[in-house]
Image: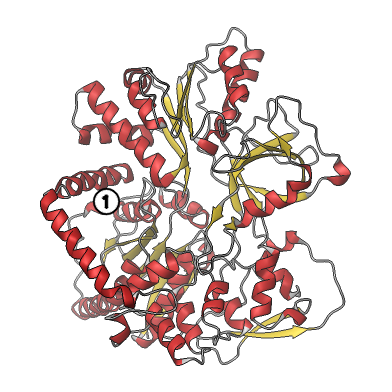
Amino acid sequence: MRRFLLLYATQRGQAKAIAEEISEQAVSHGFAADLHCVSESGKYDLKTETAPLVMVVSTTGTGDPPDTALKFVKEINDRTLPTDFFAHLRYGLLGLGDSEYTYFCNGGKVIDKRLQELGAQHFYDTGHADDCVGLELVVEPWIAGLWAALTKLFKTLGEQEMSGAPPRPADTPSDTAVGPELLHVQSQVERLRLEDADKKDPEVWGQNEANRSQTRALIEDFESSLVRSAPPLSQTSLSIPALPPEYLEVRLQESPGQEESQVSVTLEDPVFQVPISKAVQLTSNDAVKTTLLLELDISKTEFSHQPGDSFNVICPNSDSEVAGLLHRLQLTDKRAHRVILTVKTDTKKRGAAVPQHVPKGCSLQFILTWCLEIRAVPKKAFLRALVDYTSSAAEKRRLQELCSKQGAADYNRFVRDASVCLLDLLLTFPSCHPPLSLLLEQLPRLQPRPYSCASSSLLRPDKLHFVFNILECPSPTTAAAPRKGVCTGWLATLVAPFLQPNTEAPHTDRPDALAPEILISPRATHSFRLPDDPSAPIIMVGPGTGVAPFIGFLQHREKLQEQHPDGDFGAMWLFFGCRHKDRDYLFREELRRFLKIGVLTHLKVSFSRDPPREGEEAPAKYVQDNLQRHSQQVARTLLQENGCIYVCGDAKNMARDVNDALVEIVSKETGVSKLEAMKTLAVLKQEKRYLQDIWS
């Protein structure tokens, strides 16, 4: 077998699953993949590696490599390494990302760029898979093309060995050798071109829309859904993925009731068990979203934090969803049984192991509640496996369609975009009866949820605040009530008995004996912090719950100014936005107090759904509009006064719109092109003066 080294860098298991798929397919193509996580540096050595290298790298945060790759990235970024350090390496890299974030696939791009700087050469073009539209649209063809590229490389290497010829020099560096900030500039330029190309003749657009309406009317009777397809898909021959090999043997063993600790489920370190000492509803009851502030008592822990840091909350799945899954699997009567897992002796899965996130000897109910992401959208490989446990011919065909190449659009529309989970599928396809082993093989680890610290340890070293909206999403398969977010729904239920309304009256702490406790762990990244120089001016942009870390910034600055009354402190701007002034203006009194005492220099607030008062100029609707209205001051702060800008909140719309507004501001105020303005912002990001804490 022809061996290649296969490394993955994963945050939530996506890159690992894709690397394992490559490893499985390799055998049938005559290759053997030596598979490792990039963090397992004791199991491989790139300095002496002679085989081809294949890497699958995900991206986390706003463009960081995953935690498992931080040590690897630090090592290869050693600037004392010679430029031919990896000249012997031939590699191919697949990056995973989400184009809703500014630095798309940046985890992979950073590693790709640095490997080339150290002399490594591509034997196969880099792939960039986009979770925004579906990773499989790039992943599947990239893997399909990998085998021919490897075959060609091994043939070339064999010929070189026979002739004694040295390896061919590297090709001219491609775009991937450009710095990550300028890669973003390139994507923005491409977007500008697309926007220009998209300005079609309205008459032609109208004709197309009319044609589409007629087509819709013709196929109304054949409307497709999760449970059924419409022509031509329903009449097409299908190309379906290979069946993933089974590898787990499951035994359910009766056992006396035993204590089960949530600490055993987390791979985070360290973990702190802390009581919730206070819970306040920050929004009115008629607000579109309900926002809660929770206070944690960290006085008896070693948990340390600074404003701008974030932390993880370890949370369980909903009791009702776990009960529903147990009922559908006909395992309700065995929910208290211990789950004993072993690897099948005859499995065809290479490197098969019991999943790390399933602790030994725990009950079935505990594992479904605390260990597995039962809300995860099933991958196509999972759907393919479900086919073999489905007895109805019509249901079997539909599952085959959804996992097929031809059914990619239906998979995206009815499974991925609708956030369908395993329980939804089992309720939709009643003849499907998978074994428990398949769930344990295919469901990913239940991930902890990250939250921003909304307080300063300088003000209250014994308390930690955080803020969140109670997420609600429609149930994808029924007319049932909307589902609440896994973590936010759980936290809301936990604090409901002592939740206080947001009044000006002082809030009382919960007595320790009655306070529910949760598990938290610190997060590794600490880049979203106040500048080291307190005289540097800062601009904070945080609509909705995005204001949370800035409350910590302001509390911190207030204490610093008390401690150093003669200190030189830079201006602090806050651009806040919400829907309604009287319903969801978070921290209104606290922000006004910061403004009054001079800690906050400028407070600019926009209300997107409040109508303008009669006779008044229309107010700014969104934070980006307010930024535009103060473009001179924003440009001066960033470009002349060495200031910093922080953006926190929604990645999908707000962060992108704010970035576009900043491009406009820099272009207008300095008289340069949009491309030059983008380059200026890229430099600010490189200098850590344009920082984002955003989520989708």
The amino acid type found where label 1 is placed reads Ala
The answer to whether residue 270 is visible is no
* Residue 110, position as x, y percentages in the image: 36, 51
Residue in the foreground of this view, choosing between 629 and 562? 629
Image quarter for residue 452?
A: top right
Check the image and tell me how it is coloured.
secondary structure
Please tell me how many numbered marks the rendered image carries: 1
Q: Is residue 182 left or right of residue 533?
A: left
Question: Along the horizontal axis of the image, is 574 left or right of 175?
Answer: right
Eyeballing the image, is 219 above or below 398? above
The residue at which mark 1 appears reads as 177
Residue in the image at 73% along x and 31% along y: 461
Residue 20 or 246: which is nearer the viewer? Answer: 246
Q: Is residue 383 above or below residue 603?
A: below
User: Looking at the image, which is closer to me, 241 or 545?
Assistant: 545
Pick the front one: 620 or 62: 620
Residue drawn at x 45%, y 38% is: 692
- Note whether residue 417 is visible: yes
- 574 to 314, vertically: above or below: above
Q: Is residue 303 left or right of residue 529?
A: right
Provide the secondary structure element on which disc 1 rests. helix
- Tell me the residue at 36%/72% (across/down): 410
The quadrant in which the N terminus is found is: bottom left
Q: Position of residue 337 (x, y in %)?
A: 78, 79
Q: Quadrant of residue 370?
A: bottom right
Query: Where is residue 546 shown, x and y percent of the image?
Result: 52, 37
